[in-house]
Amino acid sequence: MEKVLALVEARLRSALGEPDARASVTFLGTDRIEVLRFTGAENGESRPVVRYATLGMAARPMTDPTDLVADPVRGPRAELFLTVRAGLADTDKVLRPLAVLAASPQVEGVVVAPGASLDVGEPLWPGAPFTSVLVGEPGGLVEDLELDGGMDPVRFLPLLPMTPNEAAWKRVHGAQALEERWLAAGTDLRDPLRASVRLD
């Protein structure tokens, strides 16, 4: 487990640079989850962004709750990351909600995959218009991490904050339809204070 997490952290550092802060959260009956913060400017943009990445979720494979016996080796592995524009909101308070989401495979037996909705039941940070996120496709900013010994690769899944209206609309129409709405409207998904996209 420690070896896997060391490789995961090395991949995050190679893709995002050195973290400037980290926090650790432990829930009863689960492994420790860390959240690393990375700050820096985007290519060609003046306003810096801050990225929060989980470390610990990939220590164990996610297993289908209907499986009678959990395979300790095989099964999907993932870490989560969130990117927002810096300085517009108190987004550092997202550390605990992110750790809750990263612990959900251990706590609730869910398999986190692209297209899924994850809800924390409260604003992601103080004043945030979002209580849930859409899990995006991996392979963009941080490439999958291949592992030895028959283990599935670690996928780094971006989280896209959703307003309650967007989350409700997504449940009916699906993730792809919501992403198309965002794209058509030119929605800045990194704006921590953005309004909901038009859904009528």
Image: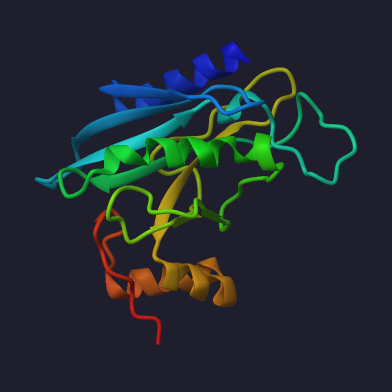
Q: Position of residue 181 (x, y in %)?
A: 39, 74
Going by the picture, which residue comes out furthest to the right? 68
Which residue lies at the image location 46% right of the left edge and 31% below the top edge?
54
Q: Is residue 134 above or below residue 186?
A: above
Residue 102, compared with residue 167, is above or below; it is: above
Residue 133 screen position, x and y as percent = 46, 55
Along the viewing direction, whichever of 58 and 148 lies nearer the viewer: 58
Quarter of the image holding residue 164? bottom left
Q: Position of residue 39 (x, y in %)?
A: 23, 32
Q: Quadrant of residue 166?
A: bottom left
Q: Going by the image, does 33 lie left or right of 186?
A: right
Q: Is residue 94 left or right of residue 60?
A: left
Residue 136 drawn above or below residue 9 = below
Horizontal and vertical percent for residue 172? 58, 77
Instruction: Indicate left or right for 177 with 65 as reference.
Output: left
Quadrant for the C terminus, please.
bottom left
Toward the bottom, the furthest residue is 200
The residue lying at 29 percent from left, 23 percent from top is 21
Q: Which residue sits at x=75%, y=38%?
A: 63
Q: Residue at x 45, y 20 (%)?
A: 9
Return the residue nearer the eye: 145 or 115: 115
Write down the quadrant of residue 73 in the picture.
top right
| Colour scheme of the rendered structure | rainbow
**Number of numbered labels in the structure image:** 0
Whether residue 83 is situated above or below residue 56 in the rendered picture: below
The residue furthest left is 46
